[in-house]
């Protein structure tokens, strides 16, 4: 039972229709086509609501189910819509846009800090990356300035697809040591920032991103924490 991932086709989509394919024992709902991004790759699942004639179902988060299903988890005690019901999906757009801005900014953070990424997390107004970095950066202000310059270049953010075999032949595309790109469908999605001579980043990613880096806006680098002998955690804030 597979849900068509509408968020991949258009991450700016705020509303869509869908049909209930199944309900889970935990009270979740599986649709034939899902506007909601499911938790994965350090990015939280979307929240929002489903509406139909005579009913409303508040969605706390979306998670991955079996065989490509996307499960919409209940926020409260709302009764889920019956199987076969046509529903109107609405996501929490402000939260989604925050995730898109932060996620794209973290890709650029991995450009200005060109070290192995050992972990990461995306929020609606902040995020963080963990790096294989034995010593903390000497000048955090200079790093922030370099990152803001990249953002202000308003570079296009696009996607490409390669086969899993092509990814295996180019292991340097994978920056993250702890999170591997989603596999199993025979191909892998790449997120490219910049084009041609202006390309600054290319890496596998299944998350949602803004269309141009200028949409990220102003950022601020927060504290840098020591996490183990060789790891440093770098926090990034919007605004």
Image: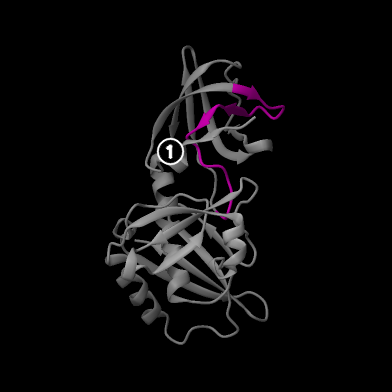
**Residue 95 image offset from top left, x and y in percent:** 43, 45
User: In this view of the protein, which residue sits in the foreground, 163 or 20?
Assistant: 163
**Residue 14 image offset from top left, x and y in percent:** 38, 35
Position of 209 relative to 59 (above/below): below
Q: Residue at x 48, y 70 (%)?
A: 110
Residue 130 lies left or right of residue 214; in this view the side is: right
User: In which quadrant of the rendered view does residue 12 lie?
Assistant: top left
Question: Where, quadrant-wise, is the C terminus in this rendering?
Answer: bottom left
Question: Where, quadrant-wise, is the N terminus in this rendering?
Answer: top right
**Residue 236 image offset from top left, x and y in percent:** 45, 66
User: In this view of the protein, which residue sits in the foreground, 160 or 66?
Assistant: 160
Residue 70 shows in the view: yes
Position of 211 relative to 62 (above/below): below
Q: Residue furthest top?
A: 54
The magenta region covers 21-42
Position of 153 relative to 216 (above/below): below
Residue 58 lies left or right of residue 147; in this view the side is: right
User: In this view of the protein, which residue sits in the foreground, 76 or 161?
Assistant: 161
**Residue 183 image offset from top left, x and y in percent:** 63, 51
Residue 65 shows in the view: no
Q: Residue at x 46, y 43 (%)?
A: 8
What kind of secondary structure does the magenta stretch mostly adopt? loop
In magenta stretch: residue 28 = yes
Q: Secondary structure at mark 1?
A: loop
User: In which quadrant of the rendered view does residue 66 lie?
Assistant: top right
């Amino acid at each position: 039972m597979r849900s068509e991932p509408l968020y991949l086709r258009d991450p700016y989509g705020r509303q869509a229709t869908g049909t209930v394919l199944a309900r889970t024992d935990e009270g979740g709902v599986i649709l034939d086509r899902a506007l909601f991004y499911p938790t994965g790759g350090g990015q939280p699942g979307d929240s929002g609501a489903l509406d139909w004639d005579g009913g409303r179902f508040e969605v706390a988060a979306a998670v991955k189910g079996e065989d490509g299903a996307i499960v919409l988890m209940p926020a409260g005690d709302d009764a889920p819509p019956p199987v076969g019901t046509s529903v109107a999906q609405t996501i929490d757009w402000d939260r989604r846009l925050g995730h898109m801005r932060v996620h794209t900014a973290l890709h650029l953070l991995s450009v200005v800090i060109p070290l192995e990424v050992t972990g990461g997390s995306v929020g609606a107004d902040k995020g963080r990356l963990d790096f294989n970095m034995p010593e903390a950066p000497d000048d955090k202000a200079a790093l922030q300035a370099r990152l803001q310059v990249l953002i202000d270049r308003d570079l296009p953010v696009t996607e490409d697809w390669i086969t899993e075999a092509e990814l295996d032949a180019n292991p340097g595309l994978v920056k993250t040591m702890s999170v591997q790109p989603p596999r199993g469908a025979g191909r892998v999605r790449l997120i490219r920032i910049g084009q041609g001579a202006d390309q600054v980043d290319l890496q596998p990613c299944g998350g949602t991103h803004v269309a141009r880096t200028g949409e990220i806006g102003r950022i601020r680098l927060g504290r840098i924490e020591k996490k183990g002998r060789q790891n440093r955690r770098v926090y990034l804030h919007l605004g």
